[in-house]
Image: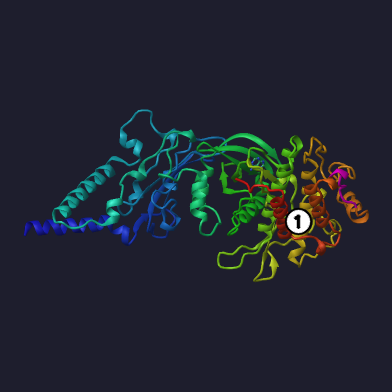
Amino acid sequence: MASIRTLVVALVLLASQTRHLVLGINCFCDICEDKTCVSDGYCYTTTRLDKATGKIEHDFRCFNKNKLFPPENPLWCRQTPLLSTDEIAPFAVACCNEFDFCNQALRPQLPSMRPQEGPPEAQIGYDSTWLIIIGIIVLLVLIVLMLLIYCGMTQNRKWKNRRPGAFFKSNDSMDPQDQQPILGGINSLRDMIDMTTSGSGSGLPLLVQRSIARQIQLVEIIGKGRFGEVWRGRWRGENVAVKIFSSREERSWFREAEIYQTVMLRHDNILGFIAADNKDNGTWTQLWLVTDFHENGSLFDYLSTRTVDVPGMIRMSLSIATGLAHLHMEIVGTQGKPAIAHRDLKSKNILVKLNGTCAIGDLGLAVRYDVAEDKVDLASNSRVGTKRYMAPEVLDESICENHFDSFKRADVYALGLIFWEIARRCNVGGIYDEYQLPFYDMVPSDPTIEEMRKTVCDGRHRPSTPNRWQSIDALNTMSKVMKECWYHNAAARLTALRIKKTLANLGASEDIKPPQ
Ligand code: ADE
C-alpha cells in the first residue's frame, strides 16, 4: 500500500515536471497584466545595462515554440553574454522550462558583472534558495524516473531527449572563432538560412537575425554611400557585409530589409540577405543590414582594375540578366513572389562572386507590384536612382507609373549600360578598352538631371560601341542586345527574360560551362 502511495506521489510530481511539454508552462512576465504568460517553449530572462541610466534591467518573458530556432536548441537561449562596446550595451539571456515561473529567479550574468572569483552559483545566475529547490526537484525527478523504470513503464520520448541545464550554459569567450557549433551540423550561416528558406524563402526568424547581428565584429570599412557605411564584419569566422544606416535613414533601412525578406526572393544572383537589426546604444539607434560578403567587391571595382575574357563576359552578363529576370518575375501561388523592379541598377550595386558570376544588391529603392490591388507597393517618386543610369522616360518624367512594366523597362535600359561597361573590358587577343562609366565622354562627372536629359532625350545619344566588337561573335551579340535595351520607346526594349535566354544561347554556342 505504502509503495502504491509513493508511486502515485511520484507520478503527480512527474506530471507537474513534464506538464509544460504538453500544456505549456507558466512564465513570469514583467509586461503582462497578471505577470504571467503561458509558453509552449521556454521562459526567459534577459539582463542588460541601460547605458543612459547606468542601471541593470531585466526582462521576463515567454518564448514560444514557433519562435525557436533551431527548435531543439534555440540560438536566442545560447546568446553569448555581450560585453559593452561603443555600439552595444552589455546583454545576456537565459532560458528555462523546468517548472512554472522558473525564469522569475533567473539572473543571467553580464560579463562585466561576473565576479572574478566567487561561488559557482553566482555565475549561474540563480540565488542559493532557488538552487536548493531546483536540486530537490531534480533529485525527486530522478527518484521518480528510477521508480518508473522499476515498474517497467516505457518512458516518454520527449523526456528521454530532454537535456536539463543545457539552457543555462553560456560561452564566455567573446571571440566568434571560439564559439561552439550551434547544433551538430548547423554551424554556418548558409546551413541556417537553407534550413529556414526551404519553405518560404523569406529569411531567418527575427530573433535569430538579432542574435547573429549582435555577435558580429566589425573589421574594416569597405564603402560609403548616401545611406551610411558598408563594413566587412566577422560572424563565427565567416565574413559578412554590414551596411550601417544612420538614424536619419531609418526608412531606407526598413525598406531594404523589407524587400530582401520578400517571400521567394532568394536567388544565386540576388545578394544574399542575412539579418537586419536596430541597436539602441542609449544615445542613438544604429541600423544594420547584414548580407553575404563578396571579396571581389562591386562590378565597378572589379572592372576598374581587371579585364574579362569572352566566357567571363558572358557568364557575368548572363548572371546579371538571370538575377534581374528573377526580380522582375511574378510567381503566382501561396508561396508566390511579387514582381519587383530595382530602380537603381548600376555597376556599383552589383557584387562579383568568386566564380565570376554576379549578385544584384542595394534593393533599397525597389518597388513591388501587388497584383491583387493592381498597384505598386510604394507611393513612388518618379525620379529616384542614379542620374547617369536613368532611362529617357525617367529623365523627362514621361514614365507611366500606373503601369508596373514601365519600371521593369527602365531597369532594362540600365542593364544595357552595365553590359556596355563589361564588354569594353572584354580582352580578346590582348585588345580591350579602359574602364569608363557610361556617358563618360558626353556629360561631366556627377551630371545633373538636365545634363543627362539633354544628352539622352533631346540628343538621343547612347554609348558608342567600338568597331572591334563587330568582328567578334560574342561582342557583336552583346552589342545588339545593348542596343535593344536602349530604345527610346520603352515598350520596344527586350525583357530581362528574353535577354537571359539570348545570353544562355550565346553561352551554349561558345561552349561555356555553367558556374560551379
Ligand atoms: N560592398 C558593398 N557590399 C558588399 C558586399 N556585400 N560584399 C563585398 N563588398 C561590398
Query: Is the distance from the Cβ of mark 1 to the nearest ligand 1 atom less than 8 Å?
Result: no
| Magenta residues (range) | 461-468
Residue extending furthest right? 459
Residue 39 x %, y %: 38, 58
Q: Nearer the viewer, residue 63 or 193?
A: 193
Dominant SS in magenta? loop
How many marks the image carries: the answer is 1
Q: Nearer the viewer, residue 144 or 304?
A: 304
Residue 465 sits inside the magenta stretch? yes
* Residue bearing mark 1: 411
Residue 2 x %, y %: 7, 57
Quick check: which quadrant has ligand 1?
Answer: top right
Residue extending furthest top? 117
Is 489 left or right of 130, judged from the image as shown? right
Residue 323 x %, y %: 67, 53
Is 143 left or right of 407, judged from the image as shown? left
Is 456 left or right of 103, judged from the image as shown? right
Q: Element at badge 1? A: helix
Q: Nearer the viewer, residue 74 or 390?
A: 390
Residue 148 sits inside the magenta stretch? no
